[in-house]
């Protein structure tokens, strides 16, 4: 679009730092949407390939589980912390500079990932690379990938917004966030075909090639320009520093805690650091004249309920990402045997994303969340019948339901959060972004940590009971003990599915009662926000 084009009032950017919303022709909308989907899938791959191949990465570099845990920490630290900074960068420097900064980081991170996994680098016969440590370069690459994934998610949302019809433009938010969920199942599906004999260089070559395609697509189709203003203040970096250190320490605690176990003495230090630093950062923001985060709004009852709901649903969804997947791993199924399993998850995710993007109604945001939690409950109840003879095919239906729920709850949750933020003013959107990002990241990490702790404790209890009951064979052989350990682990996962089923059933009932109350009173929990948005729209049209 020509740089001298004068935007009409309804085409102006929604807020400082976002692109304008011109009336594109249909063909251009199609390409914006296509590029947005490509960017979203690429962002999902940044984490998906790590999750799907962490064991292989550990084996290739000769790492211990703890060292492998630090690779996960590097990604989650930067991904959770960078949201605030990226928002202000867009506001002060504009979307064009933001894009130009994000793309080189994407290329460099993926190139570094490919480079460290290549035979050339790992070969001892090449003296040029002897002084470089592949493990530390891998940590740097994963840290950069966390930054890139957050930035690319934002770009995916903006491109999807440009490609949507005017009446459904805000559905681009759902597409942008939803596409991230495709990263893990897609990575699980393609890994057996690309990582042959456990070699990862071909896999990361594919990721690098995908980033090159993204680079080309974004270079050919720019986002419309937006507005900028000077927003950075010195205190921003102080409060951001404290909050970032606190979130980083929390990620260390949650990731390494489930590897080393929670009573490891030094783990109390990152937990203490997280509490102190986040508290200091929030205190600074509370007492600033121009805060970066609207802490008082974030502490309100409705926003806390929003954050708890988002984190709780993400935690329940760990039934799939850690529960069912973990059980199948215990039963001896590898990536090459789970292609159909993850294909079902991918199909459910795609169907849910399409339905959610086109059917989410601003007047009915609570009902889809109830439906999603009910699906998690049904899927979990079905999984309680797991046994030593369970096969991936037995989980297809239950995991289809849970994968559908994983996307379906996100649309109304994003809508509600954005409505509450925009109705209070553009300055609140950054607070919503932080709340949503942290609730999803921490909820996912906490879910994985909680499941690991629960299954470990229950496995030990079942194992002790089974061994003590072996009267006929008081000195069992190692083979028998291994079989008992596997049986005890399966029983522990059955308990896990039962607990998640009960909790999600109770959650669905509570949400249903709350929904029925508002329907009976003929009230909309977002009535105040919707009225404020209507006034803002009228004022914009009048101009």
Image: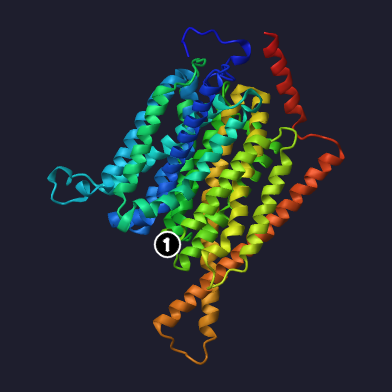
Q: Quadrant of residue 131?
A: top left
User: How packed is label 1: few (under 14 Cα within 10 Å), some, or many (20 or more)?
Assistant: some
Residue 84 visible in the shown view: no
Q: How many marks?
A: 1
Residue identifier under label 1: 334
Task: Name the residue nearer the viewer: 331 or 270.
Answer: 331
Which residue is at 64% across, 63% downward? 382
In this view, the residue farthest toward the bottom is 472
The quadrant in which the C terminus is found is: top right
Considering only vertical position in the picture, is 178 above or below 396?
A: above
> Within the image, what quadrant is residue 164 found in?
top right
In the rendered structure, the answer to whether residue 499 lies left or right of residue 531 reads left
* Of the pair 397 and 516, the residue shown nearer to us: 397
Secondary structure under tag 1 reads: loop
- The percent position of residue 394, horizontal first and vertical second, equals 57, 65
| In-image side of 395 versus 251 (left or right) | right
Percent across and percent down for residue 293 are 57, 29
* Above or below: residue 111 compared with residue 376: above
């Amino acid at each position: 679009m020509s740089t001298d084009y004068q935007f009409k009032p309804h085409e102006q950017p929604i807020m400082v730092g976002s692109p304008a919303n011109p009336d594109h022709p249909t063909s251009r909308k199609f390409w914006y949407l296509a590029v947005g989907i490509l960017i979203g899938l690429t962002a999902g791959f940044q984490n998906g390939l790590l999750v799907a191949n962490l064991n292989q990465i550990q084996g290739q570099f000769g790492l211990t589980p703890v060292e492998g845990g630090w690779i996960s920490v590097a990604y989650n630290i930067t991904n959770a912390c960078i949201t605030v900074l990226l928002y202000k960068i867009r506001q002060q420097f504009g979307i064009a500079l933001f894009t130009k900064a994000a793309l080189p980081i994407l290329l460099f991170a993926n190139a570094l990932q490919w480079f460290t996994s290549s035979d050339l680098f790992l070969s001892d016969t090449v003296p040029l690379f002897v002084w470089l440590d592949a493990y530390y370069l891998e940590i740097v690459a994963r840290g950069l990938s966390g930054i890139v994934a957050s930035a690319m998610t934002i770009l995916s949302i903006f491109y999807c917004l440009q490609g949507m019809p005017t009446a459904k433009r805000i559905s681009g938010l759902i597409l942008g966030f939803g596409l991230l969920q495709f990263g893990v199942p897609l990575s699980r599906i393609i890994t057996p075909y690309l990582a042959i004999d456990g070699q990862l260089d071909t896999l990361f070559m594919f990721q690098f090639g995908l980033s090159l395609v993204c680079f080309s697509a974004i270079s050919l189709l720019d986002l419309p320009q937006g507005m900028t203003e000077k927003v950075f203040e010195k205190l921003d970096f102080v409060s951001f520093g404290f909050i970032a250190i606190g979130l980083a320490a929390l990620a260390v605690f949650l990731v390494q805690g489930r590897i080393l176990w929670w009573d490891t003495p030094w783990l109390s230090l990152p937990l203490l650091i997280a509490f102190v630093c986040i508290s200091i950062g929030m205190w600074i923001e509370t007492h600033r004249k121009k805060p970066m985060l609207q802490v008082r709004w974030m502490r309100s009852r409705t926003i806390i309920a929003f954050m708890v709901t988002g984190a709780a649903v993400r935690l329940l969804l760990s039934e799939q990402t850690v529960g069912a997947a973990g059980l199948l791993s215990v039963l001896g199924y590898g990536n090459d045997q789970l292609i159909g399993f993850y294909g079902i998850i991918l199909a459910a995710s795609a169907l849910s994303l399409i339905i959610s993007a086109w059917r989410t109604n601003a007047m009915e945001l609570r009902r889809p969340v109830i439906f999603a939690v009910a699906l998690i409950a049904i899927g979990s109840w079905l999984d309680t019948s797991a046994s030593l003879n369970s096969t991936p095919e037995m989980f297809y239906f239950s995991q289809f339901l849970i994968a559908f729920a994983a996307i379906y709850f996100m649309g109304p949750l994003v809508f509600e959060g954005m409505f509450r933020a925009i109705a209070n003013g553009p300055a609140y959107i950054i607070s919503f972004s932080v709340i949503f990002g942290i609730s999803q990241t921490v909820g996912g990490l906490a879910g994985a940590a909680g499941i690991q702790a629960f299954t470990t404790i229950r496995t030990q209890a079942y194992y002790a009971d089974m061994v003590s009951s072996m009267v006929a064979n008081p000195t069992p052989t190692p083979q028998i003990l291994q079989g008992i350990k596997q049986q005890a682990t399966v029983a522990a996962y059955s308990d896990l599915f039962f607990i998640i089923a009960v909790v999600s059933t109770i959650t669905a009932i509570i949400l249903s009662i709350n929904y029925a109350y508002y329907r009976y009173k003929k009230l909309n929990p977002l009535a105040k926000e919707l009225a404020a948005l209507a006034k803002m729209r009228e004022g914009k049209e009048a101009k």
